[in-house]
């Protein structure tokens, strides 16, 4: 049973460009979460989605960030007009029940 | 606001030297407390879930316990491969299933 998959693993963008991060949950998991880990900081919750619905986006910055989990395909975290402060590791987690969450390997975003 | 504080920030042990990591939490209505292990450059790996005070769970050299205010991760006779950052996280009853993480304890086990 494959784990949570994220791609790309590393992403380099210049300031002002868009970043798209993809997450494929574990088979049978309908709950998807995105977390961000800034350098020298802990993991912070961003958004919680179930198929086609955003359940909790209380940790998502109000501007430039959006997330979706379509009926078909992976969950996408989109960051528009990236700035240097967006450089971080972005982790996706999935769950079958909303209790234990299983994390992917992360996408390391570097903004030049 | 939920708060999770882990101590110590870093811990160095000799192989075979048992110790404990602490996770103190402040949350109104604990839904669950979770322990993860994170290796450099990788995602957190799930270890344990604890739901109520008095509960204990074990896996190999690790044992997690829970009280109403804190959780301990006991490491018995650690090996160098146990070196990692150990993360504690809580879920609150009224805030859905999002996790609030502590800053982690970086454990190094020397051979």
Image (cartoon, rainbow, N blue to C red):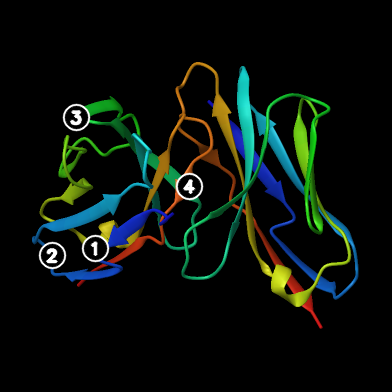
Question: Along the polypeptide, which appears first: circle 4 or circle 2?
Answer: 2
Residue in the foreground of this view, choosing between B72 and A76: A76
In the image, residue B30 lies at what x, y percent? 63, 22
Task: State the residue position of label 4.
Answer: A102
Q: Tell me the distance, in whole angstroms, between the alpha carbons under discs 2 and 1.
A: 7 Å
Task: State the residue position of label 1.
Answer: A84
* Residue A61 left/right relative to B5: left
Task: State the residue position of label 3.
Answer: A52
Residue in the foreground of this view, choosing between B86 and A8: A8
In the image, residue B79 lies at what x, y percent? 79, 73
**Tag in front: 2 or 3:** 3
Q: Secondary structure at mark 3?
A: loop
**Tag in front: 4 or 2:** 4
Q: Name the residue at 22% across, 26% down.
A: A53
- Dots 4 and 2: beta carbons under 8 Å? no
Q: Residue furthest bottom?
A: B111
Question: Along the polypeptide, which appears first: circle 1 or circle 3?
Answer: 3
Task: State the residue position of label 2.
Answer: A15
- Dots 2 and 3: beta carbons under 8 Å? no
Q: Name the residue at 72% across, 37% down.
A: B24
Q: Is residue B27 among what the camera can see? A: no
């Amino acid at each position: 049973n494959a784990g949570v998959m994220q791609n790309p693993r590393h992403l380099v963008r210049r300031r002002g460009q868009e970043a798209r991060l993809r997450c494929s949950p574990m088979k049978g998991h309908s709950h998807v979460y995105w977390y961000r880990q800034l350098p020298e900081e802990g993991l912070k919750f961003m958004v919680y989605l179930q198929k086609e619905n955003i359940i909790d986006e209380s940790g998502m910055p109000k501007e430039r960030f959006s997330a979706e989990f379509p009926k078909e395909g992976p969950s996408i975290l989109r960051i528009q007009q990236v700035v240097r402060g967006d450089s971080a590791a972005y982790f996706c987690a999935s769950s079958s029940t909303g209790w234990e969450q299983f994390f992917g390997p992360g996408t390391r975003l570097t903004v030049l | 606001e939920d708060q999770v504080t882990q101590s110590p920030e870093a811990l160095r042990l000799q192989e075979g030297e048992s110790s404990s990591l602490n996770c103190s939490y402040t949350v109104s209505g604990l839904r669950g407390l979770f322990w993860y292990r994170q290796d450099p450059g990788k995602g957190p790996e799930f270890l344990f879930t604890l739901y109520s005070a008095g509960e204990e769970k074990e896996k190999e050299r690790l044992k997690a316990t829970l009280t109403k205010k804190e959780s301990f991760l006991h490491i018995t006779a650690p090996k160098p491969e146990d070196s990692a950052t150990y993360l504690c996280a809580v879920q609150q009853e009224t805030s859905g299933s999002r996790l609030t993480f502590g800053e982690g304890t970086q454990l190094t086990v020397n051979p």
